[in-house]
Every structure is written in structure tokens, then in C-alpha cells.
Amino acid sequence: MNASQSISEIVMPRMGLTMESGRFIKWLKEIGEPVRSGEPLFEIETDKSVVEVEALEEGILSQTLAQPGETYAVGAVLGYLSPPGIPGPTQAAIQPESSSAGTESQAQPLASATYASPARPKASPAARRLARQLGVDLARVIGSGPEGRIVAWNVQATAQSKPLQSPASARISPVAQRLAVDLGVDLQQVKGTGPGGSITRKDVEAAYQQQSQTVPSSPSSLPDTEGIVEPLSPVQRRMAERMVQSFTSAPHFYLQAEVDARNLVALRQSLLPPLENRYGVHLTFTDLFIYFTARLLPRHPLLMAQWSEAGLIKFTRVHLGVAVDTEQGLFVPVLRDADKLGLAEISRQRAELAERARQGKLLPKDYEQGVFTLTNLGTLRIDVFQAILNPPQAAILAVGRIKEQPMVENHQVISAPMFTLSLSADHRVLDGGKAARFLSELVEWLENPALSMA
Amino acid sequence: MSMRELTFAQAIREALDEELARDEKIVLFGEDIGAWGGVFRTTEGLYEKYGPERVIDTPLSEEGYVGMAVGIAMTGMHPVPEIMFGDFITLAMDQIVNQAAKMRYMTGGQVAVPITIRATMGGGRSSGAQHSQSWHAWFAHVPGLKVVVPSTPYDAKGLLKTALRDPNPVLFFEDKVMYHKIKGPVPEEEYLIPFGVADIKREGSDVTIVALSRMVHTALAAAEQLAQEGISAEVIDPRTLTPLDEETLIQSVCKTGGAVIVDEGYQRFGVTAELAAVIAKGAFDYLDAPIERVAAMDVPIPFSPPLEFATIPDEERIIQAVHRVLEGRRPQ
């Protein structure tokens, strides 16, 4: 293979901080079709949604390896782009129509082409230094810099989100290590067959083959049961993993407070028509909760902090997550800088994000980097509930149904709209007193919204 | 210390005045610097005070009077030739580069050349392509010359007085636009500022902006705007290019992880390139983004004001460069 420099790989992209593999849905171009840089090239399903992936370069789609419905590790080669006018390396060999020869020959160009253009992850020197210090494998890190460059805080975030990897004790050849990084193979899972058990290139290739075969959705061992096992969707699997991680690692505690909603109900009534008329938005109670919570959070920064072994990670920008229930599962899109948004803008963005979530069209930028989550099951008739923390966040606020209840006021029992707020918090990050002060101030604001202007 | 506000030109004039009074070996040469007081008023009143033998008007002959100055410097005087428009220092290039810079070395230290060449730099006055350039980088390239690029009246006075006591050739660059526009506190008492000591003009933690001469003020204005967006920029003024205070630059970038280097000279092979190389080496493992350079565009400086301002670095270009350095670099 000599044209290595001119042929480029199409790889499974990493669409979010936690994505490790993606399910390939379909090609949006035919073999032989020219592709412009930035044009949608294929579709994948990540943990969170189905996304169209754009071509990074111009060229001709010369070879497709990825099969619809199969799952591939991040960085796995899905196909090849040839420059216009230069035939692809194996275009002649793999006739897409003559299907039988295709499958067998796919594995070969995959590995050797990877050698031809080793994709060292792009990282700043500072990020590399930090990765060495913290023992972080850069292949696991998502870059937030220009063109996906890994910068220092990305390494920090990765180090904090995963247990630190001890430097690999097994010996490994440089070629094998490079290949493992390129193919996204976890070296902990590779058995070395070289001298003294060292890991060789062949071992990594074998592990990669196995990995790309086992990851696909067909369950490897069915439980012995009469029930029907329905394979997990990536969204389901991801939710399960994250909830287990959160519930078993973060020591949760819960605070509850009842809120007299008379003023809040009146406030919404008074704002509803003008917001509808002027901005065309339909103001919900959730919008009001977002509004007051976001404006209160900067006064209680620990509620937006995150636990890490290295120390508490603090955030100043109020990116507020709002749980959205959809047929595909639970999504938590994020309103960025929510404390700076007016009510109409909150309402508009919340509705738009919820709609995108329902259509499975959320992009990573829509749900990443939240610092606090709000979840409201009031519309589903739930009076009180306690939420599991949305990792790595340290607090989540659960809102129950507003309903008329008996209330004692001035020694009289009266009827008033009331509801219950439940705050779940991570005791590693903050204690009951700090959480209570936040919650009680929030209740004060909700009961007397004018206080929020003080 | 008791302070008063002086303009950049007044600070220069005061340094010259004090040193002329202190050391009779000091003599000024230049075009219109005598009876006229200098076109930028930096020698105003000195002719009357020190007489035609120490404040000497010359013909338009940079090569002649710089050569003469190098000659009398070799006899023990400390001449101070002024190049009214720094662009025309090219005429005296041989005298400076091949004579002044080499003499001490070639005589095995027997002959020193204590000469302070004052030259202007900087555009922004619609003076056209031959009266707007900034040639300080050329001299920083030559071993045997010291190069001073002050940004404030305080620095200008303290550094010029140091230059006038230095036994070696010093090129002292003064930005024309700063002469009357920039004012700042200058102590009544005498003080000197050593060469090779950078000054942190503004402390910050997110990004380091290195700037010199007038660009320090542009960088400070940019830093002020960046502060409004929550970006904390450190502004460092090297003050002298040779000797260069590498340590302060490197330490700052180790702290911030990113650097934007600003200079009014040309970008290609310029001051920004050298400073970027120093930082890239010294702070390599701490850089979290490529170093950005903001310098004059590599074209002759246009006469047309809109075009001229488009070629010279301004706040907006610095802010954009800072944004590029910080892109994706902080948790949102």
C-alpha cells in the first residue's frame, strides 16, 4: 500500500466525553460518490442520539467497511476516502456488488492502513505533561480545543471521571501500543503472547477483531429464563451504567421542603398571556423553576461543584440540565448560562431542547457540561420523589405536583396550591447545612418571587 | 517618592537633560534637534541650556552623523544621535552594524563604543510607507547591540538614563504616537531601570500577552475588554529586547498555559517569532494551545488611514488571538 498519504480513513468519531463506541446506522453516500468536506457522510447512533457525521475532508468514498447495525469502537476505521482522481487502494479488489469476497478481505486493509497513517491523538504539550503525571491514556480523552485538540482540563476531567490507570505493567511493543491507541483497544483486556507475556501487534489486532465482534448488540449469553430478552439500546445501557455509577459511588442524601405556590401560580397566570403574545412561548412552571434555580445557584456555588480525587471541581457558569422524558428514554439537555437568560428565552430554549430530545436529535453540545439538574414529574401526577444524582453533578432538584392542599394560616385551615421540592446531593461535595440553605432560600424565592430581585 | 505626570516626550527630554548635566561627555546629534527643539519636541530647550557644542544640528545625513558619532564614541565621548524617522536608520546601517557593534570585539576590548542611538518607530499617523516602519527587530538580530523599546514615560526615562551610562552601543526606539498621547507618573527623584528586566504591566491567570512599546497600551486595553468577558490576561512588557528577560516570559506562560505576542514590527521573522520561540522552548510542557502572534501585516504600511489601521495590530486583533488561544481551554 503506497498511496497511504493520499487516502484518508473514515473513523468512528467520539461525539461526547463518555462515548466509547457507536452503532453504525447507514452510509449517506454511495461508493464512488464524491464527498465535500462538511457534507453528511454517515449516520451513527450514540448513547444519546442518532447523529449525522460530516466528512472531515474532500474526496471520493472509495471503500466502506462498516456494516449497518453493527457497533464499532471509537476510532475504528469505517471506510476510506480517496482524493478526487486517485482510485482507492482496494477499490478494484472490493467490488461492492460482488458481496461474497467482501467480508473476508475487510480486516486486512483496516489494520495495515492504520499503520500507514498513525493517528496520534492531537493534544497540547500541557495536556501531554498532565497525562503523564496523572497516568491518563490520551486515547480515552475527548479534546475540547480547536479541531478536537486535547487540552489540559480535558485530561483532568478524564482523570477525575475514571479511576487512575496504573501504568501498564505488561510489556508492550511501541507498535502495538500505537495500534491499540489507534484502534481504541483497551490494553487491560489484551492477553500478551509475545516473549515473557508481552503484548505484540498481533495480540492487539486479535483483541480488536474480538472487540468489534462482541460489542454488537447480540447478547452473548442469554439468562436462562422464559422471558424474552430484549437487547439494550445504547441509551438504555448508558443510563444503567451511569445510574449504577452514581448511586454506588456518590453518597446521596435528600432534603425535602413544602412550598406554598400561591404567588408562583399567580405569577405564572400574569406572565402567561404577555409571553405568549409577545414572544410566542408557552410559559410552564418548569420554566419558572429553571429561572429561579439558575439565578440562585451562583450564590451557592457548592451545589454546582463536582467531586474528584484531586479536589472539588468548581464551575461558575450555570449550565442547567433539565430532565426530559422521551420514548427512547431519559435525556437531560442543558440550558447554557441559564442564569443570564430571561424567562421568554428560557421557555423557548427549554421547549426546543425538549423537542429535539423527543426526536432523538440532541447533539453533544446540547447535553454536555451541565452542572446541576432539574427534574419535574409533577405533570405525571407524582407528588414527591427523590432523584438519583446525574453524575458527575453533585445535586439534583426533584419537583412534585402542584395541588390544592389544606394549609394552616393564621390559625385557620385554608386551601392553597402547594408542592414539594426534593433536593438530592452528594455528601462528598457538600453537607446538609449547605444544601439546606440553598433549598430554603429557593423556597423563599418561590413563595415570594419578588425576593429574588433583592 | 513624589510623582507627577509627564508625557512620553517630556520623560525623554528630562532624561537627556539630567544626563547632559551629569556627564559632559554626552553630546546630542540630529536633524532639527537644536534651535528647533526637535520635530517631536524631545530636545526642547536643551540647545539653549547646553549650547551648540553639545546639542548639534546636523544635515540630513544619517550615515555621516552616525559615523561621526561612532568615531567620537571611540575617543571616549558618549554621543546620542537621533534618527528623526527610524525608517532612515537604513542609511546608517553600516556604521551601526559593521562598526559600532563590532569594534569592542575586534579590538579585544581595547576600544568601547558608548553610543546611544535614539530612533523613532511606529505607524498610525498616515505618514506613508517610508515614515511608518518599526525596525527594532533588525538590531536585536545583531550581536553587540542592545535594543530598548520602552512603553511608558516612567520606563522611557529610567531606561534612557541607563543607556546613557552603558559603555556599549544601545538602540533606543521611541514610538512616535506615544510622544504626546501617552502620559504617566514619573518620580521627581532620580532612578534608573536596569536592562533585561521585563515588567508585568497587568497580572492575570488565563493567558499571557507579551507586548512592547506602544503595543503595551493596546494590549492593556484589550486585557480590560477581556476582563469584561471573565478572561484574566497578564500583560508583560519585556522593555529591552537585548538583553531579554526570558525567565519572566517563561514563568508567566507556565502559569497561564497560553501566549499571544504583540509587536508593531513585521510578523515575518520578527520580534514575535523570536519571543514565540523562547516561550515555546522554555514553557513547552505548559503550553495548552499554539502561541499566537499579532504583528504588522507583511506589506508596506499604507498611507490611507483605513488601510494603515488594518495592517497595524489593534485591540480587536489581540482579543481574537486570545480567543483562539483559549478556545475550548476552559470547562464551560
Image: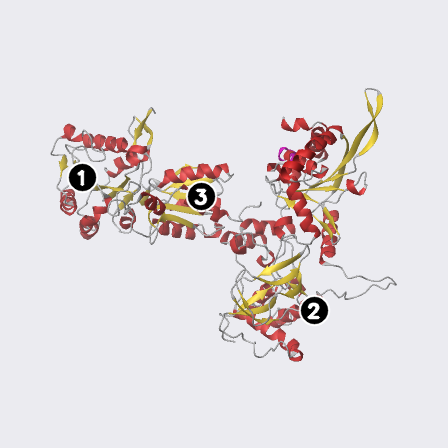
| Residue identifier under label 3 | B319
Mark count: 3
Where's residue A386, x and y in %?
A: 78, 41
B78 lies left or right of A191: left
- Crowding around mark 1 (Cα neighbors within 10 Å: few <14, some 14 to 19, many 20+) is many
Residue A13 in the image: above or below residue B299:
below
| Residue identifier under label 2 | A213
**Secondary-structure class at tag 1:** strand
Tell me which segment is drawn in magenta. Answer: A296-301
| Residue A41 shows in the view | yes
Q: Quadrant of residue A60?
A: bottom right
Residue A18 in the image: above or below residue A186:
above
Where's residue A374, x and y in %?
A: 70, 41
Q: Quadrant of residue A204?
A: bottom right
Secondary structure character of the magenta stretch overall: helix
Q: CA distance from mark 3 to mark 2?
A: 50 Å
Label 2 amino acid?
A: Gln
Where's residue A348, x and y in %?
A: 64, 42
Question: Observer-nearest residue: B208 or A187?
Answer: B208
A384 lies left or right of B10: right
Q: Are marks 3 and 1 on the same chain?
A: yes
Q: Residue at x 26, y 36 (%)?
A: B160
Label 3 amino acid?
A: Ile
Label 1 amino acid?
A: His
- Crowding around mark 2 (Cα neighbors within 10 Å: few <14, some 14 to 19, many 20+) is some
